[in-house]
Each structure stands twice: as structure tokens, then as C-alpha cells.
């Protein structure tokens, strides 16, 4: 039974999708804890309502990134995670932290990486006149929003889209691909070779969510 810990900062809808899929699809895994860096994160309530341990490591209580990273790692390690899932976790993690969990640290980013790493992805995609947007699940490496791509979902950018409509469409796709990637991980179906991830059962590592 693999032990999953999910890190959030807010709403936690991706965390919720993962928790639901883990139960519904009977994964060989359990979400053992949800940790937020923000005390008011709405996702903490959902986790508690499912009987999952929900904790806060408030970044404002630490003088700098290194001491916050150390406190977060200490909280994480108490749960002995096989996999750490970043789900809307809005703090940049230092290289030491990332290296400690390398190979068992996943992130979801709301763009088709390597396009638009960082913040305001939907706004930037709209400004660039993109016709396709999407989301990426990737293994985390010290460089922000980089790292081996596990699965990508593409959605159309429709005439009249604004940031809200586009982000809602991408988010629906996120809720499909994040549980998928995590299931593959806990089933031992992911192989990384020279920065390229292969799904060893041959399932498609991309999806189109549109007409
Ligand atoms: C998602 O779009 C995720 O890709 C991004 O932040 C958002 C978090 O949403 N990193 P939620 O907290 O999972 O609802």
C-alpha cells in the first residue's frame, strides 16, 4: 500500500479529485495526509471530512525559504510518503527539498509545458493568441515547472474565452489527468529514462478535452 501526501495552498479541487479516484478505483494506495501552507485553505475541510489527517505548515512562521522547507520536510516525513503530490501548492520549493523527494514528487501545472511556466498561465496563453491550451503533470526538478512530463491534456481556446472560462475548462482536464498520473505511479507503471517518462502498460499519455 503506497502512502500519498498531498500539498495544497487553497481550494484543493485537484486534491479532491485524487482522493475520490483513489477510493473509487481501489488503488494500491492511500492518501495519508494533506498539508497546507495556508491555514485558511478550503481543501483542508474536505480532507478532514474524509478522515484524512490535515495539517498546516504556515510559511509565514518561518524566516526564510530554507527553514520553511525544512519544517515542511519534517512534517512530510512523519507520514512516511511514497509519493508527494503538489496540488495547487503555491510556494516555490528549494533545490534541497526537491532533491530529497526526487522521483516521488509530482506537480500539475495549468499549461502545456514547456510553454508558460510560472504564474498567470491562462492570461498569457490568451494574450499570445493560443488556440490550444492545457495542463501538464510532471515530476518535479529544481527548476520551476520543469521536469519529466508524465501526461498532458489539451483543450481548445474558444472565441470569447476569458481567464475564467479558459481556466475552468483546463481545470476539468486537470481533474482527469492528475488522478491518472498518480494511479500509474502507485501501480509502478512509470519509467523515466533520460528525462522522458514512459507509461509501461502502453496507456496514452495525452488527451484532448474538446470537440
Ligand atoms: C490548478 O489550476 C493547478 O494546476 C494550479 O493551481 C490550481 C489549483 O487548483 N497549480 P486547486 O487548488 O487544485 O483547485
Image (cartoon, rainbow, N blue to C red):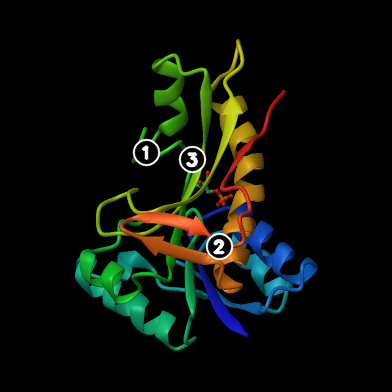
Q: Is residue 122 left or right of residue 169?
A: left
Q: Which residue is mark 3?
A: 110
Residue appearing at x 63%, y 85% in the figure = 1
Disc number lying in front (3 or 2)? 2
Q: Which of 9/134 is in front?
A: 134
Mark 1 C-beta to ligand 1 under 8 Å: no
Q: Which residue corresponds to the image point at 65% horizontal and 70% vertical from the top-left?
A: 47
- Residue at 67% across, 74% down: 48
Mark 3 or mark 2: name the one nearer the start of the chain. 3
Q: Distance from label 1 to label 2 (Cα)?
A: 32 Å
Mark 1 or 3, nearer chain start: 3
Front label number (1 vs 2):
2
Provide the residue designation for mark 2: 200
Mark 3 CB lies closer than 8 A to ligand 1: yes
Viewer-proximal residue, 125 or 141? 141
Q: Position of residue 17 (x, y in %)?
A: 68, 57
On the question of residue 89 being in view, the answer is: no
Amino acid at each position: 500500500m503506497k502512502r500519498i501526501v498531498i500539498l495544497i495552498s487553497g481550494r484543493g479541487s485537484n486534491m479532491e479529485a485524487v482522493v475520490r479516484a483513489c477510493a473509487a478505483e481501489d488503488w494500491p494506495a492511500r492518501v495519508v495526509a494533506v498539508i497546507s501552507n495556508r491555514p485558511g485553505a478550503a481543501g483542508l475541510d474536505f480532507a478532514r471530512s474524509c478522515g484524512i489527517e490535515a495539517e498546516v505548515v504556515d510559511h509565514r512562521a518561518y524566516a526564510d525559504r530554507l527553514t520553511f522547507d525544512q519544517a515542511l520536510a519534517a512534517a512530510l516525513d512523519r507520514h512516511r510518503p511514497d509519493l508527494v503530490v503538489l496540488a495547487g501548492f503555491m510556494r516555490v520549493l528549494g533545490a534541497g527539498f526537491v532533491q530529497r523527494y526526487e522521483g516521488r514528487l509530482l506537480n500539475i501545472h495549468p499549461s502545456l509545458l514547456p510553454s508558460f511556466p510560472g504564474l498567470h498561465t491562462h492570461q498569457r496563453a490568451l494574450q499570445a493568441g493560443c488556440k490550444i491550451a492545457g495542463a501538464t503533470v510532471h515530476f518535479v526538478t529544481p527548476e520551476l515547472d520543469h521536469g519529466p512530463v508524465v501526461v498532458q491534456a489539451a483543450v481548445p481556446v474558444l472565441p470569447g474565452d476569458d481567464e475564467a472560462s479558459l481556466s475552468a475548462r483546463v481545470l476539468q482536464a486537470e481533474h482527469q489527468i492528475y488522478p491518472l498520473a498518480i494511479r500509474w505511479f502507485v501501480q509502478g507503471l512509470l519509467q523515466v529514462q533520460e528525462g522522458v517518462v514512459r507509461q509501461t502498460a502502453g496507456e496514452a499519455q495525452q488527451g484532448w478535452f474538446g470537440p
